[in-house]
Each structure stands twice: as structure tokens, then as C-alpha cells.
Amino acid sequence: MTHLHSNPSLQTAVLDIIIEPVDDLPGAGGLGLESEIMRMSNEHHKFSGVLIQIINLIETNITTEPDTKDGKDRLISSISTVESNYPDIFELFIELIYLAYYSDPRVHRRIGWKTGPIQPNGHLLPPWDESILNNVKNKEPFWIHVE
Amino acid sequence: MASITRREEADFVVVGSGASGAAVTWSLAEGGFNVVCLEQGPWINPKYYATNSPDWQYLQRTKWDYSPNVRKLPQDYPVNDENSQIKVVMYNAVGGSTIHWTAHVPRFHPSDFRVKSLDGVAEDWPISYFELEPYYDLNDKMMGCSGINGDPANPPRSPRQMPPIPLGHDGERMARAFDELGWHWWPSDSHVNSIDYKGRKACNFCGPVGLNCERGARASTDITYIPDATKLGAEIRPNSTIYEIVSDPKGKVRGVNYFTEQGVAEFQPAKGVVVAANGIGTPRILLHSKSESHPTGLANSSGMVGKNLMFHVYAGANGLLNDLPTPTYQGPQALIIMSQEFYETDPSRGFKRGYTFQIGRGQGPAATAIGNAPWGAKHHEEFERNFGKNFGLGAIGDDLPEEINRVELDPKLTDRYGIPAPKVIYRVGDNSKKMLAHAVKQAEKVLNKAGATNITRNPLSTNTGWHLMGTARMGEDPSRSVVDNYGQAHDVDNLFIVDGSVFVTGGGVNPTPTIQALALRTADYIRHKRTDLKS
């Protein structure tokens, strides 16, 4: 498996905090989204280098967290600090992780979303029923007539 | 430029193939003019639309993002909007921004053309709604309009080509909420097919209508006007980036210099030039086309080119509809209900002019999470609370023109050819602020009446600069406007402008049908009054 950061266990732990495990589904770290995140980062400049930058910042910051906290609390605190200090890039990081997570078929199965292209199937809507206009049709015209 | 290849002279060169450029290209070709339409973007094969990809959520926020500053595709020029409260969005391709729109097509009201006379603000237009009406009708026929006549907020209009798009359970809920408040609502006209039309299929309600579909259910000019124009002999030349409009010592325009996809400089001579490059691109080209006869930029003796930039101001409220039988992401994302209860001026509200309410449906899973679910322990709870239940009521407000809101040429930022990028300076005006504050309160009332929960206020949307207007406005006074009432430049009688730049005011509705109607009217004028520009 390809990891994007030199400290893969930290990366996995961070992602598992960003989106935690739920029901029988692992968190964003345990789900193995690394190759998808790498593809998304490489295919468009918007996300280029975002993940590594954020994990680096978290890794650097975590050393300043009090060691009275347990490991997970220190990590959460470090993530929050990076979010406060680097809001723009952190926002991109969250967007990237969410895109990767919510593009995964296993996640789709859990939330009841149909995986794949949005076309050609679409959705069904009840047909147009003109009787819905019965009330508003009784309103007098109120547009202003000016030449 | 060292050497420029000269092409064969056309009657008209049209700059841009979007909403207005395509319309004017078709109409001039139908009138027997020899037309070349230059488009900086490529043809996009519909099979490559994002809706055909399993990766559509990612594409929607990267290569198919609304902002050129995010996409950064080869055909996109950067826009410096650091000094703008509202960020600019547009799309560059054959079909222009109609490739990427939601196709709501409400019309201006008659009062929108008379705001100075009625309300003492801005300027009156030099034309009336009723002069434009036949061109609205023609445009609806070309694009295909779903809707229904009888709206009490608007003048009667001709029968629509197709019945309205179904409202869905969420739309019907909102309609009843407006009814209970005794407020106006009506199905908005839409250039989305409710039934098959002119070989294009009916909408199948997949959701993200802005991403377009291979079915052709949502009209865009690459599948409406342009095929008809090319049948009539017009040439569409994609991947052609305009460098400048060339004028002679007498001040008349003689054609355009542009770069081909390979970066080769070419000159397209023409008897007349029509600019349709949108309210940001058009002033950029005009300001960059300085010459001895036009030292402050082409058609800019008034100094008004680039001034009076208008977007529309957006605000509203969001909420959750928890008890619907179907999820709120099913159906065109821009739901067709509109309310114009607060469209016309009412002095008791404390602001002039007004706004239209529109409704936005829920979105797919990634967009729902990004907009609503925080990272960490509460993520899944918040996601599940919103997904398939969230819903937005937005007001699109009339954004009155102010000269300080403007487009200039950026002194440093350029596109890939070194052409200066536009620099946008814009702030939301006081009248708009009061209007939006009013709109947010009324939006909350509607959502409450609809039984929505978790209602949140949105005091101002900022990534919504998709309506680009006012920067080469029309008027009767050449010292206060750029073009006359037919879109002909006051300074240059063989130069015409047909995009949203010519708007005098913005109205409180989506501008595209008005842009297209104005373009068709300009083309009609050329066809009948400017036969001197025909070979």
C-alpha cells in the first residue's frame, strides 16, 4: 500500500480522528484511502501536497502538547491547533479527506447512496400536478405596468 | 507580435460562444451574414461531462468547479478577486457558462427597466420590457422552455414549449408553506426539458444540473443555437483566445487579433465585431484594446468601461425537512419554485427594489459532509442529520450599480499568453445589505411554516458571482454609457456588445434569458439596419 506521509501510522491515526469508525466500517484511516487520496492530490493542483503539509504540521505541533494527555487527546488537540493556525489549507485537507471517504463504495452502501455515475439513471419524481397552483392562481396580478 | 497570419475577412466576428454570442451568431447567420465565432474554450464532448463519471463529486470541486481560479484549465484566465466580497465564477468552452448553469430563466419585470422613474435609483434602461418581449419568446423557442403561463407576479406570456418540471415532495411542501403565508410563488420558467424537445431528452432528475448531462435535457448553446448556426454557414472556431480588437485611425474596428490553441497569432478581419465575452471578459478586452484612436480603451470615451459591475447578492436560510418520503437530493438541485412576494419596491421595508426567493435542494454525500459535518466525534451524527434532508431557501437580490464596483486590468497578473487578467473591485452596497437582512428573516418564516428544523441563517453568499453585469452599460447619453439601446458602441459604429455588460441594472432574477433576448434584438437591428456590414 502506498502511504503519502513518512509516518504512516500517524497519518492513519489522524484520518481515523477526522472521520471515526462507525458501525462495522473503519474510519477514514483504516479504510485504506491512501491511493485514492494520492490520485486526487495528483490529478488537480487544488489538493497538491495538502495532506503531507497538514500531517507534517500536526506531527510538529504534537510535540508541544502536554504529555499528561493520552495519545488520542494529544492528537485531537494538535489537529485543532493546526486548524486554528492554518485555516485555509486545513479546509482543503478536510475537503480532500471527505471527498475520498464519500466516494468509497463501502461508505455508499452504509448511507444508502448508489455508487457510480449520477447519469444515466437519475431519480423519479411524482409527475407535475397543476392543482398545486389552485391557491396562488387566485392572487390578483401585482406586477407594475410601465411602458 | 512578430508575424500574424491574416484570415479571410468575415462580415462579423463574434467574440464568445456562450449565452449571447451563440444567439447572435445564429441570428446573423440566418440573416445571410458571413459569421466567424471565436471561442477561447474547447468543444466538450458530452460523454466527458462529470455526470458520466463515478468521480463526479471530485470533478465538481476541481476540473468542473465554477471558479476559473480553482479549475485553472488552459482556456481559463485568472481573475484577481481579492478585493471583491463576491467571487467570480464562469465557464469557458463552446457554449460558455451555459455549459455549467442551472437554467433558471425568469424574466425581468417591466419595472426593472424603469427603476429611476419608479424608485429614484440608478438609471432607467433605454428600452422597455415590452420591446424585449418578442425576443424573450424567440429565445425560449430556441432553448426550449418548461413552465406555465398565469404567474400573477409577471405579465402574461406566450404558451411555454413544455409543462413545468415536477416540484417533488420537497417542492410541494415549500409551495404549501408559501400558500399558508399568503405569499406569491410560481414554478419558474426553466430551460430544462420536462419532456423530449427538439431531439433532446427529458430531464431524469439526477440532481446536479449544473454539471450538464449527455441527455441534452438542460439547454446549453452548444446544443441549441450553435448547431443551427453552423447549418446556416457560421464558423465556430474553438480554442481561440482574443488578444485585442483592432481599430483603424478613424476609430472603426477592423477585426481581432487572437491566439490559436498552438499559440499562433492570427488576425481575423471583419466588417463588424460583436463582443460577447461576459461582464468580466468584455471590459477586459475593451480596456486592453487601446489604440491611437481609443487611448483609454476601445469604446471608452465615457470612462464607463469596467464601471458599475453588478453581480446579484444572495442570502437566505437553510433547514432540514425530516419527514419527506424521498431524500432532498432527488431532483434538479435548483428547484424550480420561485417567490416574488418581495420583488417590487415597498418603502416600508427600508430599501429600494427587491428580490426573488429560489430553492436549493440537498446535494450528494461529499458536498453534504463538506458543508455540514465537522471532523471528529460528531461527524457521523451531523452527516446523518443532514443527508437527504437539508434544504435551502435563497434570495437573489437586485444589486444596484455603483461606479466604485468595477473591473480593471491587473498590473501584474496575466493569462498564459501574457494578456492582463481582470482585477475585480466590489463591495456589497448599503441598499443590498438592508435587502438581504430582510430576505433572511422572511426565509426563516417560510422554512418554519414548512416544518423545517435546525434552521440556520446565511447572511451573504460569497462564491456566487456567476451573474456578471453592468460593465459596458447601455444608455442614451454617450458620456454616461458605452453602448446605445441596440448594443452598438457610442464611439464605434461597427462594434456591438451583447452580453451582461450592457445591463443598466441587474433585476432580482437570473439574467441569462434577458442577456439572450438583448442579443437577439441587437442581431435583428444589424440584420435590418446595418446591411452595410454584409458582403
Image: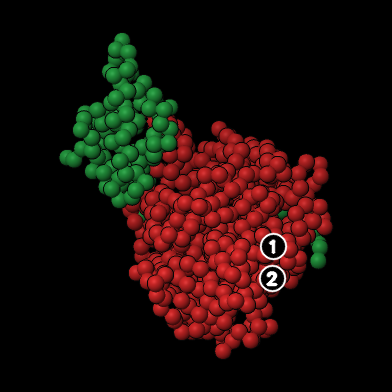
Chain colours: A green, B red
Instruction: State the count of labels.
Output: 2
As helix, strand or loop, the secondary structure at mark 2 comes to loop
Residue at the location (26% across, 31% down)?
A11
Q: Nearer the viewer, mark 1 or mark 2?
A: 1
Which residue position holds label 1? B302
- Does residue B470 appear left or right of residue B61 in this picture? right
Q: Chain of mark 1?
A: B
As helix, strand or loop, the secondary structure at mark 1 comes to loop
Tag 1 and tag 2, C-beta contact below 8 Å: yes
Which residue position holds label 2? B490
Observer-nearest of B516 and A144: B516
- Does residue A29 appear left or right of residue A76 in this picture? left
> Which of the image's four quarters has the N terminus of chain B?
bottom left
Q: Position of residue B416 (x, y in %)?
A: 40, 59
Q: Position of residue B238 (x, y in %)?
A: 42, 71
In the rendered image, is residue B133 in sight? no
Observer-nearest of A45 and B322: A45
> Which of the image's four quarters has the C terminus of chain B?
bottom right
Label disc, if present, on residue B498 of the rendered structure:
none
Q: Chain of mark 2?
A: B
Residue at the location (30% across, 21% down)?
A62
